[in-house]
Image (cartoon, rainbow, N blue to C red):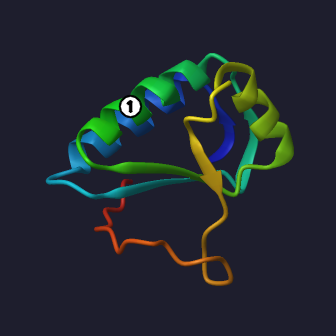
Amino acid sequence: LAGILDRGMASRVIQSTNHALVGRRYLVVLDGTQLTHLDYRCVSMLLRWNRGLRSCGHRLLLDGWNDYLSAILAMEDWDGELERGTRGPERAPLPVRPEHVRVP
């Protein structure tokens, strides 16, 4: 992801990703290192999507989201449902080896 994550972009990401997921136990990583802004109205979309992914055995990880973006997430995600963290070559490995799908 890059730039501003608005409702249109979020909807496209969700639809594209959902079409690519076949089976169970996928880790869906939204890399926020290049995001500059998050439309707060997207948080409820991400929460609904996260619940749907979990019901199918998948995980959603918001990776590399800065403090500014995390503050916007926290306005709606009071219970900390959305998994946030850092993961990558120098970051902690995942506890389970999931399948990977690249979404255009």
Which residue does the image show at 68% across and 83% down from the upper left? Answer: 90
Residue furthest to the bottom in view is 90
Q: Is residue 30 above or below residue 13?
A: below
Q: As shown in the figure, which amino acid type bears the numbered disc 1? A: Arg
Across and down, in percent, residue 103 comes to 36, 54
Q: Is residue 34 above or below residue 16?
A: below
Across and down, in percent, residue 74 comes to 73, 29
Q: Is residue 10 above or below residue 27?
A: above
Q: Is residue 79 above or below residue 61?
A: above
Figure quadrant of residue 55 = top left
Asked if residue 87 lies left or right of residue 57, the reply is right
Dot 1 corresponds to which residue? Answer: 51
Between 46 and 93, the one nearer to me in the picture? 93
Between 58 and 103, the one nearer to me in the picture? 58
Which residue does the image show at 28% across and 68% down from the upper left? Answer: 99
Which residue does the image show at 54% across and 19% down from the upper left? Answer: 44
